[in-house]
Amino acid sequence: MKGTALSKFFAEMLGTMVLVLMGCGSAVIAGADGTTGVGLLGIAFAFGLSVVAMAYAIGHISGCHINPAISIGMVVAGRMKAGEAAYYIVAQIIGGLIGSAILYLIVSHHPGFVMKEWALGANGWGEGYLDQYETIAAFVAEVVFTFIFLLVIFGSTSTKNIHGGFAGIAIGLSLVLIHIVGIKITGVSVNPARSIAPAIFSGGKALSQVWLFIIAPPIGAALSAFVWNLLIEKKES
């Protein structure tokens, strides 16, 4: 049985905190220069494993959305009421801020710490960011990757799926896959809460570009919900 509104709120807040701390922390602390640390593949797995871990920790309480785009997608798909999604989103954003605050507290006490542009694992694009993809590439990537991510979520959590007990693994691995392809483009968001927190702490270009990561993932999620309901698993009358 799902938890109460308060327990769902705290579950979503805690889960998002873990995702941001561990996912972004893997990039900031463990390294991604291709020669030392975990590299891009390690970062991709850090985000995916964070989702898997939280799915089995809080999934029975809140469903483990830990992502405003997922909550919005669930509303569009008719699986969630808008009012419930609203407090999920508030919890997710707060959780992301807590995760970034903890990460900042840790890394700022390293003797070599310098607060650079797009710090703390912030998402971005363009000149100076990873492979310097242009705005249209960043927008299309975030919409399409979120679309794919939500399709996996809708399918793996469907009541018609006889393998529902493995939903957390399927969802986590799909996030790994998305990161493997997309890290060089935007750092991969597919999650406004994951992007808002590092952007606020980083400021500068990260904050000026966060609009894309607030807008594009919900668009992808809504499109995925429409496609799922209309073309794949049509809602019963």
Image (cartoon, rainbow, N blue to C red):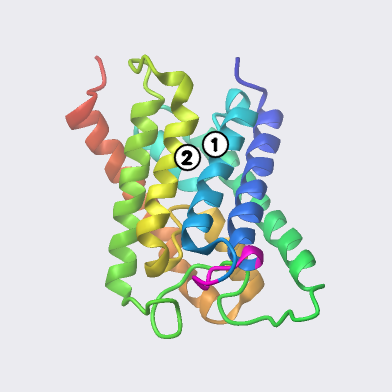
**Residue bearing mark 2:** 172
SS class, disc 1: helix
Location of residue 123 in the rendering, given as x and y in whole percent from the top left corner: 49, 67
User: On the image, which quarter does residue 89 sit in?
Assistant: top right
Span of residues in magenta: 29-35
Tell me the residue at 42%/33% (across/down): 170
Q: Is residue 201 left or right of residue 39?
A: right
Mark number displayed over residue 52:
1
Query: Dot 1 surroundings within 10 Å: few (below 14), some, or many (20 or more)?
Result: many
Tell me the residue at 39%/39% (across/down): 73
Location of residue 60 in the rendering, given as x and y in whole percent from the top left corner: 60, 23
Mark closer to the chain start, 1 or 2 = 1
Could you tell me if the residues under marks 1 and 2 are in contact, i.e. CB atoms within 8 Å? Answer: yes
Residue 33 or 146: which is nearer the viewer? 33
Report the magenta stretch's main SS. loop
What is the spatial separation of the Cα atoms under label 1 and label 2, in whole angstroms? Answer: 5 Å
Residue 196 or 175: which is nearer the viewer? 175
Given the image, on which type of amino acid does mark 1 rest? Val
Mark number displayed over residue 91:
none
Residue 175 or 74: which is nearer the viewer? 175
Tell me the residue at 54%/74% (across/down): 207
Residue 32 in magenta? Answer: yes
